[in-house]
Amino acid sequence: MNIYVGNLSWGMSDQDLENLFAEHGTVTSAKIITDRMTNRSRGFGFVEMSEGAEKAIEALNDSEIEGRKLVVNESRPRESR
């Protein structure tokens, strides 16, 4: 399952994100989206989990990490315009 994670701390790395979700199941990938020009975090990312995704969403949505309340839910495909 692909999971959207929003409102991330600017200093968080892909590895930090993976470690956070690994406590709840098996993470296959974790990626924080960065700005192409500045290479800074855009404050959100995606985590792919092979197991434990529902539990991770339930546990981490609205939790406070590095002073920011995370928004965690199942990733939905972008709507075509």
Image (cartoon, rainbow, N blue to C red):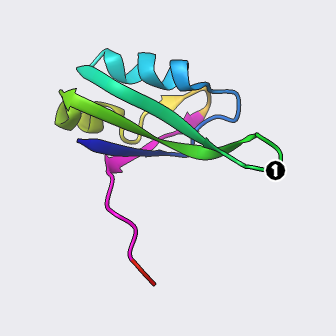
Q: Crowding at label 1, few (<14), some or many (≥20) Cα neighbours within 10 Å? A: few
**In the orientation shown, which residue stands out farthest toward the right?**
38
Q: Residue at x 50, y 35 (%)?
A: 31
Q: Residue at x 31, y 25 (%)?
A: 28
Q: Is residue 68 left or right of residue 34?
A: left
Q: Which quadrant: the N terminus?
A: top left
Looking at this view, is 18 or 60 the one in front?
Answer: 18
Give the residue number, with chain letter if any, for mark 1.
37
Residue furthest bottom as drawn:
81
Query: Looking at the picture, how far across and down is residue 21, in whole percent?
Result: 36, 24
Residue at 33%, 17% (x, y): give it. 22
Q: Is residue 6 left or right of residue 75?
A: right
Numbered circles on residues, count: 1
Identity of the residue drawn at 35% across and 33% down: 60
**Residue 35: percent from left, percent from top:** 72, 49
What range is drawn magenta here?
68-79
Left or right placement of residue 67 versus residue 6 in this view: right
**Disc 1 residue type (three-letter):** Met
Left or right for 48, reference 12: left
Relative to 59, say whether 46 is above or below. Answer: below
Q: Residue 73, position in %: x, y?
A: 32, 49
Which percent across, then down, holds residue 20?
42, 20
In this rendered view, identify the residue nearer to me: 3 or 77. 77
Residue 32: image quadrant is top right
The question of residue 18 being in magenta is answered with no
| Helix, strand or loop under label 1 | loop
State whether residue 54 is above or below residue 20.
below
75 falls in the magenta region: yes
